[in-house]
Structures are given as C-alpha cells and as structure tokens.
Image (cartoon, grey):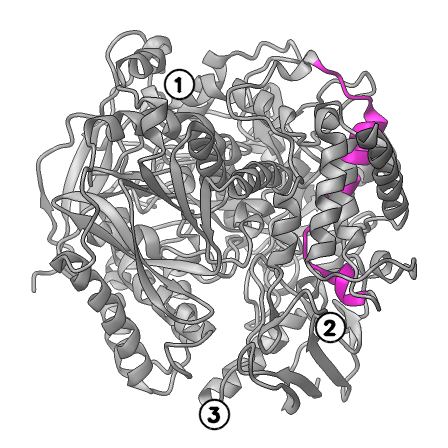
C-alpha cells in the first residue's frame, strides 16, 4: 500500500466538450451539434434517474415528456421529500425586472467571481442564460412566487451581488420549486412514462463494456437487492455535506451513489470545495443531530454584530450601540452584511476565535433586526421573514423580534462532486451527474440562490438536450444480461458489504462513528485548513476506518426495514470520501472561496489564490481504498472574466 | 429529564403490533423530540435490541417525513412537526405515548413508519398543471393578483405529512386534497384543468380508502402548516361547479 498522500498526477483532462467560439453562442452551438433521437425511437430508450430533488425531479419529468422511458429512484417514501425542499431563500435569474443593471453577462460575471475563479466559464455562462427560462417554466407550473400588488413578480437581493435578481416564495422557495418538479414528475408517473421506485436506494453502479448500463439498488422496506438496467444513468443524488455529521443537510442525504460511481471509474472533482453557511442556528449540545439554516435573505435586513470587548457576557440589549462591532459593515463597507458566504463565515469564526462570540461557548454572533423593525415596522418584517422567525423561536425558545438571533456557520453545500464535461457527462460514458452531485458551476464558492438555479437548469434544460447526443451515438441494441459477470460482481460486492456490516457485531453504533469522522472533518477540513491539520486527519482516517470494521454494531438483518444498516452502509463511503477531501485540501496549497488554507492569505486575512499553480479543477481517479488516487487537472481558461483578487470592500 | 416512553412496536406490515415501555434518562430540554428518540435508539442498539423505526429526514419542519402521534395528538402538543417539537414541551417524569399515524389508507410499514403513497397517487391524479418543459410563456405575460398569489401560496405550503388524516376521526384526506386543488385552481395557469383536476383528485382520494369529511376540524387543528379548514369548503364548491360544468 502506498502512502495516501503520495498521489500521482495523470494525464490532464483536455476535452471538456465545450464548443469553441464566443461564450454567449456556445450553448446554441452545442445544441445544434448534438445528434437527436427521433421521437418515435425515444420510447425504446430507458434512462435511470437516481434522486428526485430539483435536478432529478425536473430531469425525470422532462425526459419522460420527450418520450423516453424513465426509471427513477428515491430513498425517501415520496419524491416530494428530497432535500431541495428545505432551500429557503430563493432562485436567481437574470430577468432584470428591476431595471437595476442586471443582465445575463452580469449574472455570469458575478457567479465566476463569487466562485473565486475556479469554475468553467462555458458552463457558468450557459447557467446564466438558462436562468431566465427557469422562471418562465416554474410560473407556468403554478409555483406561487412572491408578487407585488400589481401582480408582477417580486425580487430581492442576496449575498455577493449588487442587483435584485432573486425570485422567492416567502422562506420556502425550495419547497415550492420542488413541488413544481414533483407535480410534473407525478403527471408522467400517471401517464406511465416514469416508473418510480420510492424507498429504494442505489448501492452500486453497473458498468458494462466501459459504459454505464444500470444500478444495484436495495428496497429499503423488504431489504431485497435488485438490478435495474438502462441505456444511460443519471445521478441526481445531491451533495456530500453529511460527511461532517452536523450539517444543514437532511439526515439521510448521503454520498453513496456518487462515491460508488467514483469507485467504478468516474472522476471526483474538487472534493475539498465545501460551503460553510454563515447563518445557522448554533448547536446546543452533544445530542445535536443536525443544524438548521436561517436563510441568507435575513442578511438583507438583519445586521450582524458582536461586542467590541472580549468576554462581554451582558445580554444584547444591555450592550450600548458604541460598544458593538458591526464587523461586516466595518470591514466590507460596499457589500456590508451581504458579502458572499465564505467571507461572512470566516469573519464570524475570526471574531469568535478572538473571544468575542456570544451565547453558550462563545460560538455565535448576533443577527439583529431591531433597526429593520424600527425602519419597516414589525408587520413588514413579519411578512418577509415570519416563518423563519417562527422556526428560530421554536428551536431556541427565544423571540427574535425582541432579542437578536444568534447564528454561527455550518456546513451547507458541497461545490465539489463528480467531474462532468459540458454535457454533464462523467468520465464513464453514459453516466451523467446533475445538480449538487456534480462539480460544475460554482467553483470554490456558491453564491446564494444559485443552487436552485443550477439544479433546475441541469434538470429541465441541459441534460435533456445533451443526453440525446449520447443516446443517438450509442444505441444499445441488446439488453444487459443479468448473468453478465460484471453484474454478478456488483451484486455480490453489495451483498458482501451489507453482510459484513451485519456480522461484525461490535460495540459501537453507526452514529458514534459518523460523529467521530464528522468532528474530525470539522476540526481539520472545515472553515480553516492547515497542512499540519490535514496531515493529522489523513493519518487518523484510516485508523477510524479500521476500527469501524472491527467495532461496528448493526442490529437486525438485511432482509427487513433496517435503518441502522442503511446508516452504517453510508458511513462506509464517508470514511473513504473524507480521506479524498483532506487530500484534495492538502494538495491545493492556496486559498480560494470556501477553501481557506491558513498558509495562503493576504496581509489583511483574505483568501489568497495562487493562480499560477492552481488555476485548474482537480479531478481525482480512484485506485483502491486507502491507495493514493491519481490527479487529473482540467486547466481553467478565463477569456471573459479576468481573475482578480476578489474584493467586496 | 427522565421519561417513560410507551412506543408502538410492529415488526412489519403483517405482524401484530403492541405498545412497549422504555425508560430514558438524561434528556435535555433543548433536544428535539426526534433527538430524544435517537438517544433511546443508541441505547437499544448497544443493548442488542432492535431500535425503533421512524420516518424523518430534514428535521427542519419542511420535508413532511416525520409522523408520530404523541399522547394522542398528531405531531404532539405544539402546532408544528414532530422534528420541531422540543423536549421543553414536556415535564421531567412524564409518560409519553408514541404511535404511528392510524388510518386504513396509511398501512404500517414498521413500528412508527407508515406507507403514505396514497397521497402521491392523489397528486398523480391531477395535482399538477400540464406545462411540459419548454412550452412556458414569459413569466410576466400573465400577472396574478397578489391576493390570489397569496391564497395559492397559503395552500401550497402543505408538506404532505398526513397529520390531517391521522387527526381525523374518519381518516379523511380532505384537507390534503383541498390544499393542492385550491393552490392550483386559483391561478390563471391552473384554469384550463380546473374541473378535471378536482373531479379526478377527489375520485382518487375516495378510491384510496380515506374516510369522508364530517367537518370536525381536527385536521386543520393538527396541520403544522396551518392549512385552514375553509379550504375544504372551497374544494367542495369547486367540485360542485365542476360536476355541473362537465355534465353540461
């Protein structure tokens, strides 16, 4: 076994399939170049879609509308529960309804800059173009966006930008957009075009003759392991933030689908690019099972502050105005409380590290609405943020209309994911990855209200165009034989893994291991990372993995509804993915966006990129558990947005 | 806090179920109800027992997965989802009964987990606007009066948890079904399918074995999202209107 940190650099990724020519014309060019599948032939093609969130739900519905036979999976009891449902704030689109200088080019520019120049220009421009169509599509489906008295759509602003381009449905935008996709999907289920398998979890990918041809999945109610075959497989299984144990992700969101695809040959790109969201409710104790986000939209009207003095433990209302430090407004006067998430999170960490944090353990800062209530009146604040205030009050038993909220950063989103080309195809032909599951559009930091935009862009518009080209060029005339050796091997691998988990019968619960790896990752691969810390983590992870297989205890059997088995199996994959995240963070000896290496900062503590060495996406190839992976670099070329040191001051 | 829990245990859909009693200690007031159950399950696993199965996912009150009847109330004593219920709503020494949703249209899968796929089939029957991707006109082409948009939103907030059915003495799904019908039928985009939507969804609801509505109002009292009771009468009005219109 080689030392995991001694990775090899393989051949660079050269062909991203993005067409040449002016960036604004590339999407049209690609769509014109793409081969089409005759409508009458489409029903002969089966496409597997894993996941029913914004990306998966919209892709499944759209592919079925086009005439493909779709077989779709979700581990939840209903497609309506995918975690996109929890997104609060909004969705960006370059509609320029406010006539405030917005344009497709500006959204493109803001997204490339916000991502700290680590995203592919061609993809981001396409995203900005499509943003406009998404709003039209959602309105046509009956998504009840907030409207003004004239009956037209309302907008608000979000972090990292100076225009109002965010469409929203109170604090439940994700829910409403997801229900729109779920309803479109439901229509196709009723029409017989989508075969839905709820409470069924993908546990492996089947690759036949180098092409993705199916999946191994477990029926979570009966425990039965089955194989499903198709002409192409689409992963829309979300991000991997739950590696950290505590995050704003849903409890069951997991990395198994993408990690198993990675093990089967799909490159994993930029795994260390994780987003820590600045405005979450602080944890209250060791029992904490998850963290709850408070929408970034609150930063439009709330003011963030801490006491000027260290260790000032007076209640907020007893701290006079001149003894408060509105640190974001002070350090970043142009953007104030609306700086991008990575910057706001690090600033919060810095003031807490200085000993000026508030609340239990000093792990919190105030988000104060007193000024907003004075300016707009309590009714207006209630109308805009009422449900968020209620949620806060319910969790903390404090009234945010009277006492400032306490917030602290928490893991929220993962910009990294399976490497995909311009067509959203992974390095395994026939395997596509969309939404948070891929690495594509956000670079090293995602701007607020852009995840919903990307999920729906991928699912409604991009994938349904690009997958045609693959299916037209790769007609599979023969069905996969279930007794093919690779199919039998994939099934046997899965069964062996589950049986092993059940047979160890040790003395530690799955949760105890999940918590351990999560705490390790938060400590060493969280908001600030150092070479020493990452080496410590890389030293400890294999040992945790070894202990896991010695001491794990999973009750029950494999042929029944067994939530402990589900959990333990997901942790198996976290214990490998965590290692890759740390290695990626170690190798990227620069700071950029959400990846902050303490060794690489400007004199005033901002992230210092090192473009000469690191202006690339890092796509990792798997070479065995605990074995050093192979790094393939995709050089990033900036023709339109010239990389500069990001400044929000 | 120290608590006595009486929990419904049922191995699978076909097995008989019964209440089992457990003691838990060291429960913090800041824990959510589900974190309290996590604590119980950690102890059960280490003791070699089968942990209690329950549905949950987002734990922030929006996915609609969690579904417990607590001391006889769907989602417990506060008007919220089980995941947003905190132990500060209970007293040290309390005995708490925990059961699954009880309704013939929601068969038990295991312990506290039930099968709510009937809700999905009601939506599949017509709870959508037919707008295939790519066909949409410019979003501002059709303004929607703010009161209508707000009315639509208020009903669209339904999370499909099923508390309305669990709370109803008849096991009726009228509040769930009416929420979706009202959300879509008030919007101009929903108008072309206004009649078929209500007829088909109500037809599906009836065929799933949900009970009828006798206006006890328990559903709206239990609804964590505050879908109002008049939603049902609005649906009935839509249904009557549609029957007349379609016959003609």
Kindly identify which residue carries mark 2: B69
Q: Are marks 3 and 1 on the same chain?
A: no
- The span from disc 3 to disc 1 (Cα, nearest Å) is 56 Å
The answer to whether residue A545 of the structure is visible from this angle is: no
Mark 3 falls on what kind of element? loop
Tell me the subunit letter for badge 2: B
Q: Quadrant of the N terminus of chain B?
A: bottom right
Q: CA distance from mark 3 to mark 2?
A: 26 Å
Dot in front, 2 or 1: 2
Q: Which mark is residue B47?
A: 3
Do callouts 2 and 1 mark residues in contact (Cβ within 8 Å)? no
Chain letter, disc 3 residue: B
At 31% from the left and 46% from the top, the residue drawn is A271
**Percent position of residue A510, x then y:** 40, 75
For the residue pair B15 and A338, the one nearer the viewer reads as B15
How far apart marks 2 and 1 lie (CA) works out to 49 Å
User: Residue A513: x and y, percent?
Assistant: 38, 73
Q: Which residues are magenta?
A: B142-167
Asked whether B150 falls inside the magenta stretch, the response is yes
The location of residue A334, given as percent across then percent down, is 58, 23
**Residue at x 30%, y 38% (from the top left corner):** A432
In this picture, residue A571 sits left or right of residue A340: left
């Amino acid at each position: 076994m080689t030392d995991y940190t001694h990775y090899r650099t393989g051949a660079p990724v050269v062909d991203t399939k993005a067409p040449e020519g002016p960036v604004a014309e590339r999407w049209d060019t690609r769509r014109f170049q793409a081969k089409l599948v005759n409508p009458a032939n489409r029903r002969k093609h089966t496409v597997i879609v894993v996941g029913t969130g914004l990306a998966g739900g919209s892709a499944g519905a759209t592919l079925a509308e086009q005439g493909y036979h779709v077989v779709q999976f979700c581990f939840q009891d209903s497609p309506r529960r995918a975690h996109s449902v929890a997104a609060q704030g909004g969705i960006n689109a370059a509609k320029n309804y406010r006539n405030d200088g917005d344009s497709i080019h500006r959204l493109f520019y803001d997204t490339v800059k916000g991502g700290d120049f680590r995203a592919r220009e061609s993809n981001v421009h396409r995203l900005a173009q499509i943003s406009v169509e998404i709003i039209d599509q959602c309105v046509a489906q009956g998504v009840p966006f907030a409207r003004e008295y004239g009956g037209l759509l309302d907008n608000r602003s979000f972090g990292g930008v100076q225009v109002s381009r965010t469409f929203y449905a109170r604090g439940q935008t994700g829910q409403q957009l997801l229900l729109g996709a779920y309803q479109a999907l439901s229509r196709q289920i009723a029409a017989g075009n989508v075969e839905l398998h709820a409470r069924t979890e993908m546990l492996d990918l089947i690759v036949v003759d180098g092409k993705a041809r199916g999946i191994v999945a477990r029926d979570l109610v009966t425990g039965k392991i089955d194989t499903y075959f198709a002409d192409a497989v689409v992963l829309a299984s979300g991000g991997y933030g739950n590696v950290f144990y505590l995050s704003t992700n849903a409890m069951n969101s997991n990395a198994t689908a993408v990690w198993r695809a990675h093990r089967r040959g799909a490159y994993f790109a930029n795994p260390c690019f994780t987003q820590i969201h600045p405005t979450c409710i602080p944890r209250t104790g060791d029992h904490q099972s998850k963290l709850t986000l408070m929408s970034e939209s609150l930063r439009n009207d709330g003011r963030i502050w801490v006491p000027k003095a260290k260790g000032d433990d007076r209640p907020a209302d007893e701290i006079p105005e001149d003894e408060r430090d509105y640190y974001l407004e002070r350090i970043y006067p142009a953007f104030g409380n609306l700086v991008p998430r990575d910057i706001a999170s690090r600033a919060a960490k810095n003031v807490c590290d200085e000993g000026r944090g508030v609340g239990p353990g000093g792990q919190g800062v105030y988000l104060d609405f007193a000024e907003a209530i004075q300016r707009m009146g309590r009714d207006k604040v209630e109308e805009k943020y009422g449900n968020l205030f209620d949620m806060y009050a319910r969790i903390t038993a404090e009234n945010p209309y009277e006492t400032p909220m306490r917030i602290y950063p928490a893991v929220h989103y993962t910009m990294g994911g399976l490497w995909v080309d311009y067509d959203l195809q992974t390095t395994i032909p026939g395997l596509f990855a969309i939404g948070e599951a891929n690495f594509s559009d956000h670079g090293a930091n995602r701007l607020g209200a852009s995840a919903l935009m990307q999920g729906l862009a991928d699912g409604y518009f991009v994938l349904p165009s690009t997958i045609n080209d693959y299916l037209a060029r790769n007609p599979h005339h023969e069905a996969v034989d279930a007794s093919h050796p690779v199919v039998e091997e994939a099934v046997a691998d899965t069964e062996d893994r589950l049986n092993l988990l059940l047979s160890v019968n040790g003395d530690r619960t799955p949760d105890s291991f999940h918590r351990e790896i999560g705490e390790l990752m938060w400590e060493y691969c969280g908001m600030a990372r150092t070479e020493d810390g990452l080496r410590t983590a890389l030293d400890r992870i294999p040992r945790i993995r070894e202990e896991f297989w010695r001491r794990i205890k999973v009750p029950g059997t494999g042929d029944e509804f067994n939530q402990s088995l589900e959990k333990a199996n997901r942790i198996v994959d976290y214990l490998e993915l965590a290692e890759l995240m740390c290695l990626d963070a170690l190798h990227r000896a620069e700071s950029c966006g959400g990846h902050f290496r303490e060794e690489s900062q400007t004199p005033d503590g901002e992230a210092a990129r090192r473009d000469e060495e690191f202006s690339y996406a890092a796509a990792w190839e798997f070479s065995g558990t605990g074995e050093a992976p192979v790094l393939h670099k995709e050089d990033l070329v900036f023709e339109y947005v010239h990389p500069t040191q990001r400044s929000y001051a | 806090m120290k608590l006595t829990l009486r929990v419904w245990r049922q191995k699978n859909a076909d097995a008989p179920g019964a209440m089992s009693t457990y003691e838990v200690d060291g429960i913090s007031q800041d824990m959510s109800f589900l974190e309290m159950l996590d604590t119980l399950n950690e102890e059960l696993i280490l003791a070699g027992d089968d942990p209690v199965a329950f549905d949950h996912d987002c734990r922030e009150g929006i996915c609609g997965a969690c579904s417990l009847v607590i001391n006889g109330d769907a989602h417990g004593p506060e008007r919220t989802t089980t995941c947003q219920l905190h132990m500060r709503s209970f007293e040290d020494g309390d005995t708490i009964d925990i059961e699954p949703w009880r309704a013939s249209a929601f068969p038990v899968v295991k312990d506290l987990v039930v099968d709510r796929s009937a809700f999905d089939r009601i939506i599949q029957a017509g709870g959508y606007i037919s707008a295939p991707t790519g066909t949409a006109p410019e979003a501002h082409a059709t303004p929607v009066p703010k009161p209508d948009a707000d009315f639509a939103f208020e009903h669209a907030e339904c999370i499909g948890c099923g508390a309305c059915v669990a709370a109803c003495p008849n096991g009726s799904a009228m509040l769930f079904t009416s929420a979706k019908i009202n959300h879509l039928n008030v919007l101009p985009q929903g108008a072309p399918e206004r009649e078929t939507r209500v007829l088909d969804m109500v037809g599906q609801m009836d065929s799933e074995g949900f009970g009828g509505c006798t206006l006890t109002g328990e559903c709206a009292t239990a609804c964590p999202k505050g879908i109002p009771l008049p939603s049902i009468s609005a649906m009935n009005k839509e249904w009557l209107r549609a029957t007349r219109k379609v016959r003609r």
